[in-house]
Image: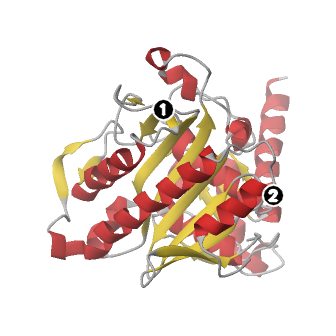
Amino acid sequence: MQGEHLFQFLIHEQRRNPEATGELTLLLSDIATACKAIAHAVNRGALSGTLGSVGAENVQGEVQKQLDVITHDIMVNALEWTGHLAGMVSEEIEDPISIPAVYPVGKYLIAFDPLDGSSNIDVNLSVGTIFSILRAPEQPRENLTASDFLQAGIHQVAAGFCVYGPATVLILTTGNGVNGFTLNRDLGEFVLTHPDLRVPESTCEFAINLSNQRYWEPPVRRYIEECLKGTDGGREKNFNMRWIASMVAEVYRILTRGGIFLYPRDHRDPDKPGRLRLLYEANPMGFIIEQAGGLASTGQERILDCQPHHIHQRVPVILGSRNEVERVVSYHRNAHQDHGHFHE
């Protein structure tokens, strides 16, 4: 019901499932609390003296911003003691994060990017937090390893992201559609403002970093060239291009008005055929987009079917409005078939 608080919404959802124990409800509530704290840290900006980098790189080889470290700590500190988790994976840390022995262990795992789009922080553009929740294996705490997180996206129990923009908005799915909650700062509560979000099947907007064009595979170059030419290139309409360099902002726009987002495979670095991390970027966003009626693919396969091999594994990402994603996938499929015939 539009206007109800997040916890009310979660309780109503819980009551629909007679087998629910309430643990997931409490975990999602704890994540929302962490997102409120991150929103506060982000919104203070230069007033807090936390802008800029820390002068070091994270496990991804990316320069860490001060807020990358702060938001990672906020997430860990908010979730490690709750008793709902058996372990965590963060973009900022190479290995899984164990639950301290003084705290009880729960039945879920979480993988998260504490501050997606952090390169935008210093120029005051939208950033966000992305998370994916999986079931933990039934085993003693001391036996938990990185391999326990290597579950295909179809096994996600819940996923969401929080975008810190002009308003702070939490997007959430538990496998029963997608809903959006706006932070009411007067109440300190997330309130349901965007019930049952659906991605329009068709769109006239695409989001991609055009500066990488020379590195793309032919199917993606073909698709983008068509979009740029619009009605002059055989398409039935003209397209607009968007690029914010913040996945949460791109996906939020797609959820609210349609579009397609591409961070495709390229040949800049043979060790990184994709740029976005499967466990805590592509999987949760793919889950959300599919639950809203869109599609999410690597170009070669459905993202949620990808079997992870490493907790920081990267994959190409193409997601959004169904008709456009299907077109890009068909171009990949045709290119693969043509390549196969060439070698016969």
Q: Earlier in the sequence, mark 2 or mark 1?
A: 1
Please tell me in which quadrant of the rendered image residue 230 appears: bottom right
Q: Which of the pair 342/242 is nearer the observer?
A: 242
Secondary structure beneath dot 2 equals helix
Q: Is residue 224 visible?
A: no
Q: Residue at x 74, y 36 (%)?
A: 305
Mark 2, residues whose alpha carbon is within 10 Å: few (<14), some, or many (≥20)? some
Q: Residue at x 73, y 39 (%)?
A: 154
Up-down relation of residue 211 to residue 333 (above or below): below
Q: Amino acid at mark 1?
A: Pro
Q: Position of residue 261 (x, y in %)?
A: 62, 62
Left/right placement of residue 249 relative to residue 99 reads: right
Q: Position of residue 151 (x, y in %)?
A: 64, 30
Q: Which of the pair 291/305 is nearer the observer?
A: 291
> Where's the C terminus, which quadrant?
top right
Instruction: Give me the disc on residue 327.
Output: 2
State the residue position of label 1: 270
Q: CA distance from mark 2 to mark 1?
A: 26 Å
Which colour style is shown? Answer: secondary structure
